[in-house]
Structures are given as C-alpha cells and as structure tokens.
Amino acid sequence: MHHHAPLQILQEVFGYGAFRGAQADIVDHMVSGGDALVLMPTGGGKSLCYQVPAISRHRQGRGVAVVVSPLIALMHDQVGALEEAGVHAAFLNSTLSSEQAAHVEREMMSGRLVMLYAAPERITNPRFLAQLDSLNERGLLSLFAIDEAHCVSQWGHDFRSEYLSLSLLHERYPDVPRIALTATADDLTRADIIERLKLEDSRVFISSFDRPNIRYAIVEKDKPREQLLRFIRDEHEDEAGVVYCQSRKKVEETAAWLEAEGMKALPYHAGLDAAVRQRHQDRFLREDGIVMVATIAFGMGIDKPDVRFVAHLDLPKNIESYYQETGRAGRDGAPANAWMAYGLADVVNQRRMIDESPAEEEFKQGQRGKLDALLALAEATDCRRVRLLSYFGEASSACGNCDNCLSPPATWDGTEAARKLLSCIYRFHQNGGQRFGAGHLIDVLRGKVTDKVTQYGHQSLSTWGVGASLPEQQWRAVLRQLIALGHVVSEGEYHTLALADSARAVLKGEVQLLLRVPSVTRGKATRGAPGKSSGSKAAPIDLDFEAQQRFEALKTWRAEVAKEHGLPAYVIFQNVTLAEMARLHPQSLDELAGISGVGAKKLEAYGREILRVLESEAQG
Ligand code: ADP
Ligand code: ZN
C-alpha cells in the first residue's frame, strides 16, 4: 500500500482497523479532489472524513488543509490530539500571542503544516487571504473543511454571520476541494447550506441519524430534582454528564443542590464570567465524573467522547434541539442515557414563549408546529426512536432501547375525562366569563372545597365533583395532553385556561384520546422488583477484577501524561482503548500495536511506558 493510501493512514496514524459507515467513500472522494457535504450524527466520526484526506494529500505534496471551526475554545485540544498522533497541526485565533501566530504562519507558508484550524472571521482577513493566495499559487492548499456547517443557516439555532462569507472560498479557489460537515440539518437547513456555501456541485453524503447506543427516556415530573438525583445515583454514579435547564437561576440552584448531595457538579451559562466558564469547561473535559449543569449555551462541539448521560430538567424548544443536545452523550459508542423530565408547566411555558416572542406570525406558526412534534414525542406510548428518526425522514422499527420499548406504558381511554375537563372550562366561562388556572380547575373537578370555590360559588356548577374518582396527578396529565394537543390554551400572567376551537370535536365525543397512565400512579400499582425499572446501568466496560486493577493503573498513568501535556485525558488515549489494553494485557509492543486506538506515534511515545505499567501492576 502507498504511504498516502487512506486505509494505511487510518491504521498507522489513528490506530483504527477500518473505516466506519460512509467514511471510506467520503475520504476517497476528497482525496481525489471532489467537494462534499456530509450529514452525520454526533459521534459518527466526521473528523476523520477531512483529517485522513488532509494527511493523504499532504503526503502527496499538496500542502496545507484549512479547517474552519467556530469553536475557538476547542481548537487547542483538537490540535493537541493531532500532534499526539504525530500529525503536524496548528491553529490561528485571537488567543495566540503575535510571536506564536508568526510561528504558525511560517509553518503554514512553508507547506510543512498538515492542518490549520481557523475561526471563520479569519477567512475575511485580508492578510490571511493574501497568504492563502500565495499557498494556492504554489499548489499548497490541499483542501478546505467547514465544520459545523449549519452555522451558515438562519434556520438553524447556531447562526453565525461570519459563516456567510465562506462562499468566497469557492469563488477565490475554485480548484481546491471543500468538505462541509454538520450533525444537524433538516431539509431547509440542508438546502441553505448548499446554496450559501455554493456546494451545488458537491456530492451529498447522508448517514443514518440513529444513535443506537443512546437510550431515550422521558418521565413525568414529580419532584424533578429528586428524580434527577435518583437517575444519576442509580445509573451514573461518578460518571460524566450534562444536565440542561432553561434559566440561569435554575442552573445555579440545581448545581448547588447536586453539589450539596455530594456530586461534582458545576454550573455553566452565558451570565457567568468568561474565565469561570472556561475553567468549568476545562474541568469537565479534563476531570473524570463531572456533572455539568448548563443552559444551552454549553455544548456545541464538545467532543468529549465519554459523556454518559444528558438530562433535561426543562423541555427543549423542538426535536432538533432535543436531538442535538442528547446527541452529546455516548460519542464513543458505549451505552449512554438521554433522560428528560417534563410536566404541565413545561408545555405552558414553551407555548407562551412562542406566543410572546416578537417574531412574525408565520414564524411563530412554524415554531408551534415544531413544539407540537416534540410534545407528541413526550406523550408517545410507542417507540421514541421510531418517532425521532421519522421526524428526520428515516423509517425504522421499534428499537428495544427506549423506555417505551423496554417497559411499554399502560394506556387508558381518557376521552370521557377530557370531555369533563373541557366542559368545566366552558362552565366557568358561562358563569361570569371568568378564567381560571389548572389548580382551581382540578379542585372543582375533584369536588374540593376551597376559599376560591366558595368565593365563586363553583359548588353549584354541573361539573362540580364529577371527577372525584381520578387522582390529581392524572387530571394534570389529562390537562397537559389537552394543552399539548392544542385543545386548551393557557394564557396570560396567571396561566388561565381557555378552550380552542378544536375542543368542540372532543366535547362532542368525535375524538378519542388514548393517554399514558402517569408513571407515578403506574409505579405504585405495577412496579415489581426494585431497581429494574429503567434497565441496567450503562456499563461500557466490563472487566474482571485483575483487568479492572490494570485499567485503574493505566488511568492514573494517563492522568499524569495528560497533565504534563496540558491536554484532556481522552486525547492521550480514550477509555475504550485503555480498557482493551487492560483486558488483553499485551506482553510486547507488537501486541500493543494491534489494539484499536494505538497508532504508530503513540506506540513509539508511550508503548514501553504502558508495558511497564501493566507489568508492575501484575507483580504488585
Ligand atoms: P463527530 O465529529 O462526528 O461527532 P468524531 O469525529 O468526534 O465524531 O468521532 C467520534 C468518535 O468515534 C471518536 O472517539 C473517534 O475517535 C471514533 N471513531 C471515528 N471513526 C472511527 C473508526 N473508523 N474506527 C474507530 N473509531 C472511530
Ligand atoms: Zn424504542
């Protein structure tokens, strides 16, 4: 094999045995000079799609690959990972001193550099463009990679205006191959990326968006913090995870509370000082078992492979956001959990945020449609993954790895209850036009005497006490689903309830409502053996006692190396690689080289050390 053959590079430099999925085709296409748009889920292996071609083309004398990435905070680690693998890489961004930048520029202009990472705003910098011109004239611009390509689209959630100017790459350097990559792209965004980046003639590679190792679960809120704590304790003790909350205040409170419960939890949101945010992100990347409690300000491009869970304490905006946020779990392919708690207030809040936003009515209508799809997912009684994938246009069958597949929820016919609830709202309206919120409505349905009931004389309503047999929790579920389905609207500062036009059909009994039995009620009646409810603990690594000792020793060794090099531990070796070393217990450099994730450079740099660590563990 030639030293510039892609497979040879994959094995020698990265230590991996084979390409995954579409990687091989994409790499071949790039090596032979084509343009590509790559849609691949998080953890799918996008980086190798441009790294291997960059190395291959460099070995053929074609110079430097320019990687455009919006994630300045991560460039240092990305470049560190390449240098560890023996690939000459560097970045140019505002964090460098002028001497450092000058050094990088010299390496670039000589063509010695294999890969240069740059922030998008640099591309329009005249000085930088002049340098690219000079490289191009000498045939030393090997390719452009545009990471997080959805940032070019106004439809997406991460729009960056600097991305718009990236179309100039094609105009100025039409012969240099380009590859744009993203993990989020519905049809609209995809069309936008193609148009704005002028990728009309490029090949489009679409991978399945399924993340089979992620287990999806959505539970109804009932003391959500405690539910969260139980979820983490039962399934993710000492493992890294992200907990998403909507507001800064809730982030702070939840982090403090988890901390008080003895967990290593850190807050992250846009209101924190930049230095604090950076420190917390560094700790999350570098230390084991940190729980990051964050707003959505955290996470884009976090390529930590061993995030074992993502939890939502508040409802995301839509399925795209949910999928992107949960997708940060389990990039290494080992089992991971996506867990969300949601309740009535979430539905009400999200609807209100849309209603009250200053956007155009047409835009709001679109947002409402997207929220409805997410609510339908939350209320679903069938496979969550089938619904998620079908949202992205992919057909599939029941997955066996989501809460609904693992323990199918009981359903009940809520048609009658829904009619009672709707007619109670209707009676309020007839009886003086006053509107009320959920609490009072449920009190009236259940026939509870309160001051408010007496004050408004609601004991005389025909719907008074008609729902005494259903527990409050179940009434909340009925109301939540009616709001989710759009039959009831919740308005104003006091969340008062009103009927939507579509409620008429339900009142007439023309619509059947099949509802989930709330898991809280269900749990009391049907839950059997304790601890079996949510499946087994996600244990990526199954080692016997001695292998476990070796694994721990290797981790200790890795922590020292990582610290010395100022890099996150997983950049030195990922957990899966260390676990293989511990399990196989290689006796020679040759045996060690056969382990996935051990490339030539790392073997040379660390091989003897690793054998020594394994040896001394065996003796001690
Ligand atoms: P993405 O950018 O698509 O989210 P990454 O490029 O970070 O994904 O890859 C995810 C993980 O999969 C990384 O840990 C990477 O090392 C690993 N990986 C990617 N391709 C392969 C492969 N062909 N063989 C083994 N591991 C791979
Ligand atoms: Zn399923």
Image: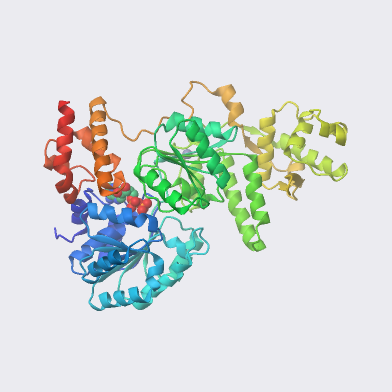
Question: What colouring method underlies this structural image?
Answer: rainbow
Task: Residue at 46% x, 33% y: name it.
Answer: 232
Instruction: Determine whether, in the image, residue 361 is placed left or right of residue 137.
Output: right
Counting from the top left corner in percent of width and height, residue 184 is at: 45, 56
Task: Residue at 67% x, 51% y: name it.
Answer: 352
Residue 527 visible here: yes
The N terminus - image quarter: bottom left
Residue furthest to the top in view is 529
Counting from the top left corner in percent of width and height, residue 89 is at: 26, 60
Counting from the top left corner in percent of width and height, residue 271 is at: 53, 51
Task: Judge whether 392 appears above or below 422 on screen.
Answer: below
Residue 45 visible here: no
Instruction: Determine whether, in the image, residue 426 is placed left or right of residue 292.
Output: right
Residue 182 image-quadrant placement: bottom left
The C terminus - image quarter: top left
Counting from the top left corner in percent of width and height, residue 32 is at: 25, 67
Instruction: Determine whether, in the image, residue 141 is placed left or right of residue 347.
Output: left
Q: Nearer the viewer, residue 169 or 371?
A: 169
Task: Residue at 28% x, 64% y: name it.
Answer: 100
Task: Residue at 33% x, 73% y: name it.
Answer: 128
Total numbered labels: 0
Q: Nearer the viewer, residue 591 or 241?
A: 241
Instruction: Determine whether, in the image, residue 273 is placed left or right of residue 205.
Output: right
Task: Judge whether 520 appears above or below 153 on screen.
Answer: above
